[in-house]
Amino acid sequence: MSEKPAPKEPSWVNRFLLVAIFLTLVLGAVSVYIGWKEDRELHYSGREGHSEIIADISVNLGGIPYQEHCLTCHPQGRSANLPARPKPIKEHPDIHPHSLYELGCTSCHLGEGMARDLIISHGVPGLEARKVLAGEELQASCYRCHELKPLFGAEKAWEGFQLFSSNACDTCHNVDGLGGGRYGPDLSQVGSLLGLKQIQTAIEDPKADLENSIMPKFSLSPEQVKMISYFLKSRMREPFYETPMARMVRVRKQERIKAKEEEKVPGLGKDFLRQKRCLACHKFQEEDGQIGPDLTYLDHMRPEEYIRRFLLNPRKEIPGAIMPWIPLTRQEEDRVIQSFQQKEEGKHLHGKSPKHVYMLLCQRCHAAQGDGMGTIQPNLANFPRAFWKNVEFFRRISDERIVRNIEKGIPGTSMPPYGDLLGREGIHSLVNIIFREFIRIKRDDKSNGLSLPPKPAARPPREGVEELYQKLCSKCHGIAGTGKGPEYLKHLPRPRDLTNQPYFRSLTDDRITLTIAYGVPGTGMSSFIGKVSPESIWSLVNKIRGLSNSNGNAG
């Protein structure tokens, strides 16, 4: 039997390859010509003071030799005067006691000193980490050579460091031993990675690049953001004022000094809370960091045992909380408690106007317009309940549940108990104004009770539950149940964290079943009644109990 001849390749393939090779060569030749033409413009020999010879200089910074040829286009540091880009010539300002020929150009201005391309030499591509600095921006380079202390000419960069510290940024971020934060990225070398613009954007709007960033948006003016960016830009991979060994010695010395300072016993109240950076985020009396909850009335809302547990592990009490763990000695912990323990006669809000109470206690989370978009909403682990015209939700839930949530709080969330602070009468007055001003229905306008799906006699098999959960729930709540599934950013309010043990421990099985069956109005949680069997709904209740490690014995 004769062998079949091998199939021939389509003739068009060879033609396609030839065309591709030809176009590649043409593009390469055009790129070379453009580069040659620009190089001739940059190094034009027909003008006085310019030469085809590259003006290389070498400078010694921190014991490391650096080469650059910036002076080819900027003789004696003057502004460049190119044929295609004529500009008035500006002389370099006097930088005494520094010398241009000792420091070079890139030590202060950055840029790529050995590049021959105009764009690359000015450090524009990518994240612009080497983008040329000019004018006031040069303050970002001062602390590459000088130690971090008050310095003439770098006042804004120094103020940026002060702001970085006073706003408790070093609680989450580490900056070359200046802060011990473990929750955010290490910023010790951020100046070598990002340009000023990128750093400023990350401070102004943390979610601009990473939508799921947990960094809060601080109430900083544009000028303050600029100052902090100058300080952070000075945090480079290789500072010129010290060797790696000297840096290690300095960091250890800073740690010893910090430990000695922490041994000093400060006063109580605002002074102590300010020293421990609590007021950088929280409100206490008239001081307000506008990031976290108001702590002014904490002594009326949280018992001492809860505060101690929260300080020890914030995310255990409120899963998903962005507050970092702050190391405190037992004595410091006692002082935090004592700073809040200021119960006095008349300190409660009994008898106060409900409008005054709402604006004082509720609008920070639920917003003055009642839509749940309060000042600190983006920083909370759970989205505050929206009141504004959320009629269907409030028709479904009993009046008793609404009052109980205000009186006793909601476990596993930032909703505290207000029973002691407001009293029973004050709570009912607050509920009345919420219904009248925001929900816009009568308080007793309730829909007929939702019927509970019949409970199966036998426990459903585990395999079927896992498959059902992945099919119906994992896109929003995630496979692990943390509320961060692949589609969770599409929803606001965000999907519930199903691993929140304190929250689900406070719920009955019936309550969870009704939520799955009929959904939650005003959220992305849809109804599954009629779409899946009652047995499937109850099987998901068991799955949630497993994820949250809770039981169904709540009252």
Image (spheres, helix red, strand yellow):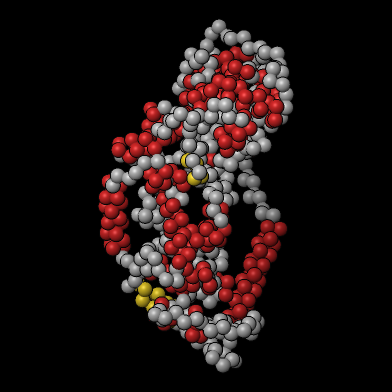
- Tell whether 135 sits left or right of 523: left
- What is the x, y in percent for residue 80? 57, 82
- What is the x, y in percent for residue 440? 72, 27
Front-lying residue, 167 or 266: 266
Please count the marks in the image.
Answer: 0
- What is the x, y in percent for residue 552? 50, 15
- Tell whether 149 sits left or right of 49: left
Front-lying residue, 494 or 486: 494
Q: Residue furthest front?
A: 345
Q: Quadrant of residue 32?
A: bottom right
- Vertically, is 293 above or below 113? above
Front-lying residue, 192 or 165: 165
Residue depicted at 39% across the width and 37% down the height = 339
Residue depicted at 71% across the width and 18% down the height = 445
Q: Quadrant of residue 247?
A: bottom left
- Vertically, is 28 above or below 327? below
- What is the x, y in percent for residue 92? 51, 82
* Residue 61 visible in the snapshot: yes
- Vertically, is 545 above or below 184? above
Please identify the quadrant where the N terminus is shown.
top right
* Residue 418 visible in the snapshot: no
Residue depicted at 30% across the width and 44% down the height = 265
Q: Residue furthest top?
A: 457
Residue depicted at 53% across the width and 40% down the height = 379
